[in-house]
Image (cartoon, rainbow, N blue to C red):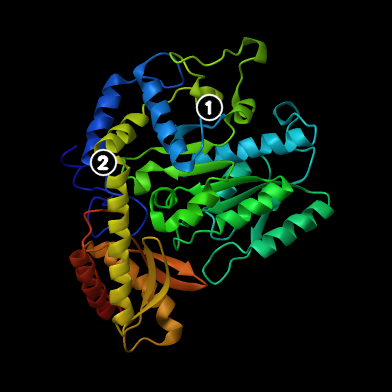
């Protein structure tokens, strides 16, 4: 292990790892993962500590949204946002088919033609979920975005109306609370209005930006929109600094979701008790479930929500410092910013405009090979960019200043 594994990490613990939304793990989360593995429970349900810890973690997040367990809100921890999207859309499928008088769990998906609405900025997990649910990618309607890469609500209304007129069933809208590519937050309140009027399920992918939206005061408008979703996905292993893997899906109406996943006959279903709540396996796909909750529980107990607010705000401030430094430089161009994401291009003298895309790609490869800083290439509005995402409280403005110089040196050699 010492010779072949630990010398070759992924690298996200480094303060100059800026490529993807992979945070450095909090030491308390690392220690808690060891304890959880030693306890080794299966958290499908039952009467043991791990079950109650997960319920408490879920309750804390529901309260951030203003959702009440007493009114039926529920949720469970997952492997990440991809699993959350699959579960949210499966619940949406159940509701849409039930409205059409179809028991999709018995009859399958071929009886009606459905539509799922998302932008090109949506994470690829949405497409995978649609494929996995047997809906077919032809059911996905790509909604245009505005100049800030946010969902165009006028286009969404028009597409839903035209699909209804053509006999299709709008199944779900998937919005983003912080896209991975640019950090854009869709107009969640407007989208919630549209979904409520049309009776369409709203799933919000908050895998990256969800914690910021739920905690920061300057994002209160987005938070109010987020609270109107039917399901929300959050990744604790992104902007809550927990070790991989731990995400969650939150349901505003858990009682309806239980009809999607439970295989317990209704006449045998027991009502929850304080000692033994309804099993998590009745709200998702997994039966054997690991003790993911402990690392999240201990970190929240240690940091508190105010501690998380400070850390997340600090990451955004470091990203703002990067944007300010790039904006004042003559050899860089900012293409997009959002939350703690900055997408930019290196524009050194001697590189023609038509060669700039290839230059960014060569530059990203050079940076990743050398290893002094790690950024990822991406595309925004058809242009190749370098993308930095700060989700590591150990990343300082000094690191950012050094990364800029590293990029310049690598860019001069690759130009």
Q: Is residue 118 above or below residue 241?
A: below
> In the image, what residue occupies the spot 50% across and 59% down?
185
- State the image coordinates of residue 89 (x, y, percent, origin top left): 61, 41
Q: Which mark is residue 62?
A: none
Q: Residues within 10 Å of mark 2 (few under 14, many from 20)?
A: few
Q: Position of residue 6 (x, y in %)?
A: 20, 43
Query: Which residue is farthest top?
Result: 268
Q: Is residue 104 left or right of residue 276?
A: right
For the image, the number of numbered tags is 2
Seen at 71% across and 45% down, the residue is: 199
Return the disc, 1 or 2, that comes first in the chain's sequence: 1
Q: Quadrant of residue 357 in the image?
A: bottom left
Point out residue 275 in the picture as x, y percentages from the top left corner: 43, 13
Q: CA distance from mark 1 to mark 2?
A: 27 Å
Which residue is depicted at the point 38% across and 73% down?
Answer: 344
Residue 230 place in picture, x, y as percent: 59, 41
Q: Is residue 28 left or right of residue 47?
A: left
Q: Nearer the viewer, mark 1 or mark 2?
A: 1
Asked whether, in this view, residue 82 is left or right of residue 259, the answer is left
Q: Is residue 166 above or below residue 133?
A: below
Check disc 1 and report the residue beneath it.
70
SS type, badge 2: helix
**Residue labelled with disc 2:** 303
Q: Residues within 10 Å of mark 1 (few under 14, many from 20)?
A: few
**Element under disc 1:** loop
Which quadrant is the N terminus positioned in?
A: top left
If the image is split into quadrants, where does the C terminus sit?
bottom left
For this rendering, which residue is in front, 301 or 201?
301
Tell me if residue 390 can be seen.
Answer: no
């Amino acid at each position: 292990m010492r010779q072949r594994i630990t010398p070759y990490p992924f690298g996200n613990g480094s303060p100059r790892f800026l490529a993807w939304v992979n945070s450095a793990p909090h030491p308390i989360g690392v220690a808690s993962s060891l304890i959880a593995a030693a306890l080794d429970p299966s958290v499908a349900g039952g009467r043991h500590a791990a079950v109650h810890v997960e319920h408490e973690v879920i309750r804390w997040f529901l309260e951030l949204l203003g959702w009440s367990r007493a009114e039926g809100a529920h949720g469970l921890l997952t492997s990440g946002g991809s699993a959350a999207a699959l579960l949210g859309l499966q619940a949406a499928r159940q509701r849409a088919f039930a409205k059409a008088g179809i028991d999709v769990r018995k009859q399958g998906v071929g009886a009606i033609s459905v539509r799922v609405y998302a932008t090109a900025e949506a994470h690829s997990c949405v497409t995978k979920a649609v494929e996995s649910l047997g809906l077919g990618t032809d059911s996905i309607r790509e909604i245009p975005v505005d100049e800030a890469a946010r969902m165009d609500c006028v286009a969404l209304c028009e597409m839903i109306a035209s699909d209804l007129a053509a006999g299709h069933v709008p199944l779900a809208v998937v919005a983003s609370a912080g896209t991975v590519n640019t950090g854009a937050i869709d107009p969640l309140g407007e989208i919630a209005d549209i979904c409520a009027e049309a009776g369409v399920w709203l799933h919000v992918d908050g895998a990256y930006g969800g914690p910021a939206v739920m905690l920061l005061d300057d994002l209160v408008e987005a938070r109010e929109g987020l609270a109107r979703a039917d399901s929300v996905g959050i990744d604790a292993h992104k902007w809550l600094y927990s070790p991989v893997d731990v995400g969650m899906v939150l349901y505003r109406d858990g009682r309806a979701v239980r009809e999607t996943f439970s295989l317990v006959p209704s006449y045998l279903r027991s009502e929850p008790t304080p000692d033994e709540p309804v099993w998590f396996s009745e709200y998702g796909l997994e039966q054997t479930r690991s003790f993911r909750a402990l690392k999240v529980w201990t970190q929240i107990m240690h940091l508190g929500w105010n501690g998380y607010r400070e850390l997340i705000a600090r990451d955004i401030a470091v990203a703002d410092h990067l944007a300010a430094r790039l904006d004042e430089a003559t050899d860089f161009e900012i293409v997009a910013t959002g939350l703690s994401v900055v997408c930019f291009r290196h524009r050194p003298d001697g590189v023609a405009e038509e060669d700039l895309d290839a230059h960014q790609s060569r530059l990203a490869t050079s940076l990743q090979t050398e290893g002094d800083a790690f950024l990822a290439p991406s595309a925004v509005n058809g242009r190749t960019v370098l993308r930095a995402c700060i989700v590591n409280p150990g990343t300082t403005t000094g690191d950012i200043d050094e990364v800029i110089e590293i990029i310049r040196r690598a860019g001069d050699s690759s130009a």
